[in-house]
Amino acid sequence: MSTTTMAALPARNQSKVDPNNVNRAVKSLLKWWDSKSKSQKNSEQLENENENENDGFVYLIVTVKRIPQLDRTNPIMIPLPHPLIDLSAEDSPELCLIIDDKHKNKITKEAALKKIESEKIPITAVIKVSKLKSDLVKLEKEKRCCELYFAERRLMPMLPKLLGKEFAKKKKNPIAVNLRHGSWKEQIEKACESALFFVGTGTCSVVKVARLSMGRKEIAENVMVSINGIGDSVPGKWKNVRFLHIKLLESMALPVYEQVGQP
């Protein structure tokens, strides 16, 4: 981890993870990825694999001792030095907003689109909850794949049932946005610039922390910042963190931390 990044962290967040372990693990994963890419002889097969959006991510696997009693619909957000989503890029990914058009005090789709345009909010599609499934099918037919889904806060309790099991398998939990108070743009940009730690129903959770398109140093810095942020945010803090691993979609999980000497 760079000196600058380390200096930015407060003393209470002093990491229990050796940056050298992270650097070695990142180097090994990138070496594996490079070897896998070079051995791919069938260009059509390579193209098909690259269509899988998850291939380009580095994941942090967090194993805790006790399942945290947290709101599972809202992630812990850890600001990253190198964001996963570049909102300034011409080919920035699709971001979708689900609005509640059934409530008496509803925000209409037309009003939402007008606000998005006037305030330059990085949302590319607005979906009404009354047409949720049909609009999602339409986006899929148009081959528009949303990188992140945002939803009006009051919709969060009902969304898992409305979205169904197939959507849940994609691991794209919608992120709550307060459309009544606060800046839409700030809330959405914060999520795009953070690692999103959704607490699972078990002791193990998976967090996207970097992209393979980043350099090795950038990946390692993102991993370290994510580790420190999770260690300081999860209930029980570091005492509740049992293991930390990093991996790619199809690679082995490489250990970077194991708690020892604690019951």
Image (tube, helix red, strand yellow):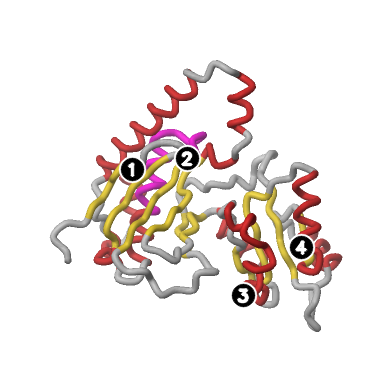
Disc 3 residue crowd, few under 14, some 14–19, many 20+, Cα 10 Å:
few
Give whichever of discs 3 and 1 has the lower sequence position: 1
Disc 4 residue crowd, few under 14, some 14–19, many 20+, Cα 10 Å:
some
Q: Which amino acid type is shown beneath numbered disc 1?
A: Ser
Q: Residue furthest top?
A: 41
* Alpha carbon distance from label 1 to label 4: 44 Å
122 or 173, which lies in front? 173
CB under 8 Å between discs 3 and 4: no
Say the numbered circle drawn on residue 2.
Answer: 1
Task: Pick the quarter of the image with the N terminus.
Answer: top left
> Viewed as shown, does residue 182 lie left or right of 10?
right
> In the image, residue 61 lies at what x, y percent?
38, 51
* Alpha carbon distance from label 2 to label 4: 29 Å
Give whichever of discs 3 and 4 has the lower sequence position: 4
Above or below, 99 against 3 in this view is below
Residue beneath disc 3: 157
Q: Which numbered disc, 1 or 4, marks the residue closer to the eye?
A: 4
Element on which disc 1 rests: loop
> In the image, residue 222 lies at what x, y percent?
41, 47
